[in-house]
Image (spheres, coloured by chain):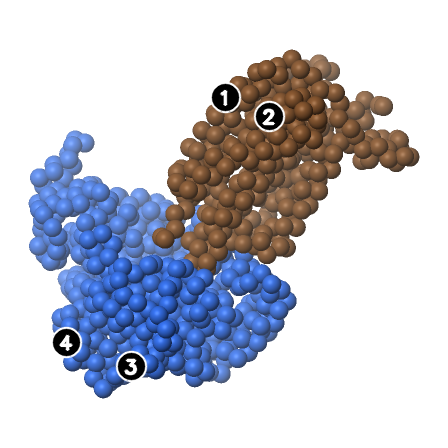
Chain colours: A blue, B brown
Amino acid sequence: MEDASSLTDGLPQSPASSLVSLERITKRFGDLLANDAVDLAIGPGEIHALLGENGAGKSTLVKILYGLIEPTEGEIRWKGDIVALDGPMAARALGIGMVFQHFSLFDNLSVIENVAVALSADITLDTIARRIRELADTFDLALDLDRPVWTLSAGERQRIEIVRCLLQDPDLLILDEPTSVLTPQEAEDLFGTLQRLAARGCAILYISHRLEEVRRHCHRATVLRAGRVVATLDPSTVSARHLAGLMVGAEIGDVKPAPAHAMGIERLVVTSLSLRSEEPHGIDLRDVALTVRGGEIVGIAGVAGNGQSELFAALSGERLCGDRAILLDGEPVGHCDITARRERGGAFVPEERLGHGSVPSHRLGENTLLSLHGTSGFVSGGLIHPGLARRWAARIVKTFDVRKEGADPRAETLSGGNLQKFVVGREILRDPAVLVVNQPTWGVDAGAATTLRQALIDLAAKGSAVVVISQDLDELFEIADRIAVIHAGELTAAEPTSRLSREAVGLAMAGAREHTGESGKVERGATHAH
Amino acid sequence: MTIFEAILLTIVTASTPLLLAALGELVVERAGVLNLGVEGMMVMGAACGFAGAVTFDSTLAGILCGILAGMVLALVFAIAVLGLAVNQVAAGLALTILGLGLSGLIGQPFVGAQREVIAHLSLPVLSDLPVVGRLVFGEDAFVYISLAATATVAWFLARSRAGLTLRAVGENHGSAHALGLPVLKTRLLAILFGGAMAGLAGVYLSLVYTRFWSPGMTAGRGWIAVALVVFAGWRPGVLLIGAYLFGAATVLQLHAQAAGFGLPSQALAALPYLATIVALVLLSLGRKGASVAPGSLGQPFAPDR
């Protein structure tokens, strides 16, 4: 690990002064080496970032530190002593708290019950309520104690998790991708809280792939790649691109903007689209309007769970709506199912690539049929022409640089990035009039993300209308010509990206009718107990 | 005693075993486990309870034997679904089949035996009041136990910390485990409680309701109990109403058949089911999202370590 030591410039890791140090932690799952002799030390009051691509071993490492997974080799020192963590209870007893990426909350329990369930039974609910209110004052974490969790926003849910950890007075707080579900303002609030905590001496281990955040707020960063530490450094001294390069192990290319081209005719027109959700906790679409011209990429920003999946289902024809609510190249298609919309030039890429965008156990050739069966001529008289489908799959693979094992592997054997390239490529190669894609680069490595974004830009430049639904604001600001924001099933008018600020988009993501108080904190009106 | 009074009294006897068994299943399901073996545990309780009572010539011994039989069967189920993480539906169905078969074997020597009526509460003056006297102050111990158990379970789930742990485990076992809650232990205790209650319900059938043993005498009451839990939206209070509603409809349709209404008897026999479903659906209307199935219901749980 020569490169690691050379990059650990001027930041000596002395275990003596560390609060916690992981020493040569190795974890094997069968043949997979998830962590390979990882060293990590965190001092009191330090905000330490743990960076890495998906599958680099970040989650495994923190699960080991939280006692959820047992390491194959290596030891953990807590305040200098070797400790054995045989479960989350042991970790919490030491003073380690963890805020999970997918919240470990109970939807049908109230806020205070969610907190109480993690605490010792001798503490009464009244005491808990009092201590939550104290914390809320100190760290600006307002919570309405009696509401059931399923009625709360992601930011509020995260506050419960944090409060639950803080009540146990931790010396180390682990946060796994804490800002991925937050609006930019909610993320700023979170950092304010974290800095106040660090100032009191609490160490924070912060897992993220949002490099700008890490550069602004973290004191030190450890970068993992393929289970090994490749660098430990002060992130504020290097560029985000340098960090990304360390994570991927190669230089990251830039997305080339499209050459100047005129906007074409209106290819997708949505007017007064209202649709009740069929899910018990789903979001109803309310009077959505959207116009996308040929040659244009329109981004739809929003915090997860604000109607994105419902909007995608309505646009793609997975759910039907009023006939004239959706016009595709001037033709009403609201009553048409997804195949009929594809025949008129529509193409749709759902959020979940494995299971929705592809059949995991089917080969790539067979998977081309999923969206092309009606339009490609692969099927005639009820019979499939497997040769044609395989050749089409091979074309997708070649055009979009899909890396795979074997001639025609099963979809589930591809990595996330490569499968996403295949699923998006399958639609792009049809030269669609309109492409609607939901979360195009979610959970995809940086290299594949660049390829995918470039492919969307190139498609638009050729005259297609492209709708990108994404929670990644950086992505939308990079590729979209205009951005609209979806909040609670309502869509704002799309504004040219050049005239928008992140703050404005972030506010709209939190709901346009809400106002900002001092310190940029988003108030939710009557929903908090004050 | 008027006929009206007699009908009310039989309604209570018809409802009590349903309430007991369903209450146990409610706790099991709130802990996230679907035990479809209620029928099997109940019929085992009936057989072993009757066998115990006859053998030791003691109602109390019978009750203990019945409860124990239900718990032993529940333990078998717990080993399968908690220890080996097998499919809960399959394990529950197997348990019912096992219980029906085994109870026939155990009860064989006792076919034809008869027990005398067990003691009813008797208070001076109060039990002799017209109409309400026998109904409120003259029931057998099982009735009072079932009502007290309903209140206790309701309090336990809503107010106690152990109940909170149980609800959390049923709501999301992954999160509960990550927080360090004892998922498997909680579920084991819940399943054993369910077994005990089903066993007690069975004892009631053979020692109070009929006072003899016949194979398969539960006649689907275990399944009704499972259905009541779902229709009651996993709430003890509503469950009480549901159980009594079903009991009332069953008794009334028998009287209707005897009175010779114009309806075919099969249609009348279906009435309790229809009435219960309609009533419980009406009760759960307008509470959208407020009370839904426990999030982890029926899913096997195998911790990482």
Residue occupying the point 12% across, 52% down: A404
Residue occupying the point 54% across, 69% down: A143
Q: What's the chain of the residue with tag 3?
A: A
**Separation of residues labelled 1 and 3 (CA atoms):** 69 Å
Q: Is residue B32 above or below residue B221?
A: below
* Mark in front: 4 vs 3: 3
Circle 2 is placed at which residue position? B48
Q: Is residue B129 above or below residue A74?
A: above
**Which structural element holds mark 1?**
helix
Residue lying farthest bottom? A10
* Mark in front: 1 vs 2: 2
How many numbered badges does the structure rendering display?
Answer: 4
Neighbourhood count class around disc 2 (C-alpha, 10 Å): few under 14, some 14–19, many 20 upward:
many
Amino acid type shown at disc 1: Gly
Q: Front-most of A513 and A5?
A: A5
Q: Is residue B294 above or below residue B132?
A: below
